[in-house]
Amino acid sequence: MNIFLENVKQFLEWSITKVPDIFERIGNFFSYFEITIGLYTFVVRWVFPILAITIFLRCILPLLQGRKRASAWGYLMMMDGSRVPLKHWENSIGRSKVSDIVIALPFVSRNHAVLTFRDRAWYITDLGSKGGVKVNGIKIEAPQIVNYGDTISLAGVKMTLLPADEEESGLLQQDDYTATLIPSGRLFNSSAAFALILLFQFLGVIQVMLAMFPEVNLAVTLTFIVFIFAETLHFHIKHWLSRKYLELELLCYFLCGMSLFIVSSAAPDLLYIQLAAILFGMLVYSVLEFMISDLGRTRKLKYLLASTAIILLVLNLAIGETRYGAKLWINLGFITFQPSEFVKIAFVIVGTAALDKLLTTRNMTAFIAFSGICIGALVLMRDFGTVVVFFGTFIVIAFMRSGDLRTIALISSGALIGAMAVIAFMPYIASRFATWRNIWKYANTTGFQQTRTLIAAASGGLLGVGSGNGFLASIAAADTDLVFGILCEEWGLLIAFIVVLIIVFLAVYAVFLTKNCRSSFYAIAACGAASIFLIQTALNVLGTVDILPLTGITMPFVSRGGSSMIASWGLLAFIKSADDRIRPDKAGD
Amino acid sequence: MKLLLRRAAILLFFSLLVLVGLVIFTWQYVNNSSTWVQHPANRHLYANGKPINLGTIYDRAGRVLLQMIDGSMSFHGDKTVRTAVMHATGDMHNNVETSAQMAFPDRLSGWNIINGIYRLKSRSGSGSNLTLTLDAELCAAAYEELSGRKGTVGIYNYQTGEILCMVSAPSFDPENPPDIDADPEKYEGVYINRLLSAVYTPGSVFKLVTAAAAIENIENIEEKRFYCDGKLQIGGDLVTCMSAHGEISLSQALASSCNVAFGQLSLELGPEKLQRYAELAGFNSSLEVNGIKTAAGRVELADAKDVELAWAGIGQYTNTANPLNFMAYMGAIANDGLLVNPRILRERRVLSFVNASAGENKQIFSPDTAKKLKALIRESTLSIYGEDTMRGLGLCAKSGTAEVGGGKRPHAWFAGFLDSEEFPFAFVVVIENGGFGSRVAAPVALKVLQAAVNSF
Ligand SMILES: [Zn+2]
């Protein structure tokens, strides 16, 4: 309340001093304009957080409460005549409570079999059960095709496979709504949320241009015109073609907009590159989403991406360029890029596995070997932040595949010993740990970035000083490493938190999607991609504010950097693919 | 998929860790951002380590005490005034820890946690304004009265808490800082505001603490008579008096500052009670003047032997007092036992009021005790200084001559208040190694008080 009065007081004081000025210098365009600039920032700095909070809520609520129209891919007719829907492409059957189809009979194994829908046919796989699996009375030794009408017997428990109702070529939409995370009947219109994002960006770009006045950089204007046009086009095409929820894209438009604001403040000359990266990222996103919609195609893609990744890493080590003490870049003459960013996509896809594979062979040799190569190469490149990202993601994927806490703990402690050895032998890393939680002592040396971030964050308060009015953006590499500080200073703590919360939300959302996912492939990929986003954000944000040691890593979607932006969009495709729910307005199609 | 959902919880766990990190950051932000923002590397506030927008510091009459014009600092136009308030405003290089510059940088820069450093302004705007409760002319008069002696003069309104006069000597002209190192004797402790940050042996002014304990703990104290033959024998040790005062009442003992009478009182009260009343009077704790912590005076009687207890009751032994704390004690006696916390900022902000209200006003003893003590001091003051001194203003005061040993002259104290609704002032004067309190400190205090009354 007091702060509010303070603002009113400031405004009154300001008006009293300015009003005579206006009359005195009427006709003097520049002084008149300067007053308008002051007033504009004064007003919009209250509007931005309100808009951002509204956008955030309007995007996350539909994603979490969006109802699952339970699509059954087929049915199992049990002996008592009941029809059990097969809700996924992979359905585990067994005595265990976490089986998709639970048969609570003592002679059925905990994980007895998996019924998989693959290449338009159903297969049954015995998971090494005691009682065995029979199809039409014949015991199976290897995964075997099951036709509609066939009888499957699990240790004597008989069931018949039936097709889904014919109406939609084997793809039934049943009016059986499953429970949702947030039970609410309210429907949100994604177009309205999109309009709010456009409004935010429109007001923002005016703020940036006014802050630059009178030396307005036309690149800012042009970039935002193209960006707003592109996202509108992207949104409308998606809205028309796709039957899925679009709030995920909306959140990323918002984040990309913030990255353009940051680049406008820090390095307006590089805006076009950032814009190009966003546009290309959207393209990569759409292509990848299409590619992985088919599991057979994805399997081929997996080998292609894995081998490309290894080649890129080897090339990087051979001909890479060193910047800021890390060898992360490949220069092709006309373009420079960071291979490790693209390796992230390969890493996620290599880690995935379908449920039958996942339950039959606990074997992760290929994935572990690939992880080892990636992490080893990154250590040689001295990119230790990314090492942590890959390792954390490895833990998530490995745990989802094996469910074995003991092995994970073993690997983690091994990694910890390795990390300690690295710290002990590399003075450059050790010095970062010496600075950690001690930044004010090293304020002008190793603590430079962190102290400046905190000073800038404090200067911004909750509402920020206005985009383009900060000082942190002029510090070297601030638009990649210190984006959280720039957001705090120019946009205020509230918006900076919302940006971080969007990333945290992506992780929660990926977990939420796992429950009703068609295939474990998509579930693992979504969680893997989300964990890359999450760990990167944690290292970036918490590193610059001295909660964690500083690692100099980018924040997905927000930091300046073409490779990082494109990879972020690519990873987003994995999260998107895990969500096969249908928007209410497309449900009738 | 239920199986995978269960395993995916590991990602939720990671998310939780990130949220915990954010909460820790928020906590640090709430607690420390006002400090972070004042770092000289903040280019909103500093250019090359020098402040850009400092704002303006005014005194209570609207006189400009310190201002930032085009990146350079300017002080009040009069040399004596700016020297007198140097400790309040601070100098050009932030040498005075308790100065307004150092204590209220966020107010001067206009910072708050919601708006940050942002202010509605044209590009050549300035910082914020700060009005102190001081009367700069009164401070100048007090500084003149000290006439080069080291010490301090403080006057405050015991009803509102406003400090009107705060002077510490030695000081210097902040616009033309002298070479401090060239004369270490003359500029000893020049950056210390002696009113807030110094402690001195209190000497006889401490008898007002002993008297308060006696009033509340010894029955019929008004009728009690003491006998002084010039010395008090305690075991093998002696407590001596200026002269043999004969048979005297408590008020006569206070008027003649009889060591024997107060030594006897201390022994009668015992160490626990005396300790308790010293602590009520503000010893062993510091006050916060708008967040500026004062030095704490000290009274420790736990291990005192009898003779030491007697000396402590007359303000010697290991006792020390902070001038401002003692002035606030004087104010509490005048204000019916209610100690109104002194403050230096004129405007009360809603928020600062809420924050500070807990520690602000403290009833240290009952109005009845305060009234008795007040009458006692008034009676003794009248007997020494007569009706004509500060006529009609109800002067109540006690002098002190605090022995410091080491062959040095004693510190001269004079502390008290005006028992007046119109001029509710409490005051303290300390002159280091000045000699007799009644002869050295009292004239300074009376002149400055008269000036305060005239200008209020
Ligand atoms: Zn005597």
Image (cartoon, grey):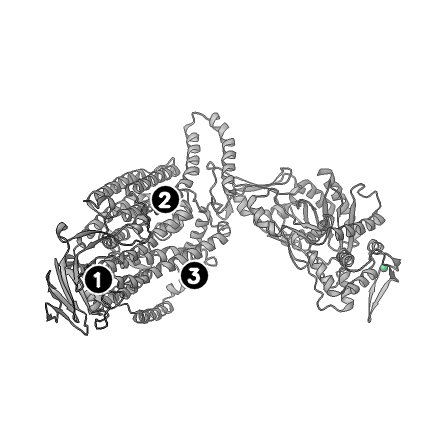
In the rendered image, residue A235, in percent from the top left (x then y), is placed at: 24, 43
What chain letter is assigned to the residue under label 3? A
Q: Which of disc 3 and disc 2 is earlier in sequence?
A: 2
The numbered mark at residue B171 is none
Residue kind at label 1, given as amino acid type? Val
Asked if labels 1 and 3 touch by Cβ distance under 8 angstroms, the answer is: no
Query: Farthest residue toward the front?
Result: A80
Instruction: Please name the residue that numbered disc 1 is placed on.
Output: A350
**Image quadrant occupied by the N terminus of chain B:** bottom left
Foreground of the two, A11 or A580:
A580
- Chain for disc number 1: A
Q: Which of marks 3 and 1 is nearer the N terminus?
A: 1
Q: Which chain carries label 2?
A: A
Q: Name the residue under label 2.
A: A54
* Mark 1 nearby-residue class (10 Å; few <14, some 14–19, many ≥20): many
Residue in the foreground of this view, choosing between B207 and A354: A354
Q: Which residue is drawn at 17% across and 56% down?
A: A73
Which residue is situated farthest in the bottom direction here?
Answer: A130
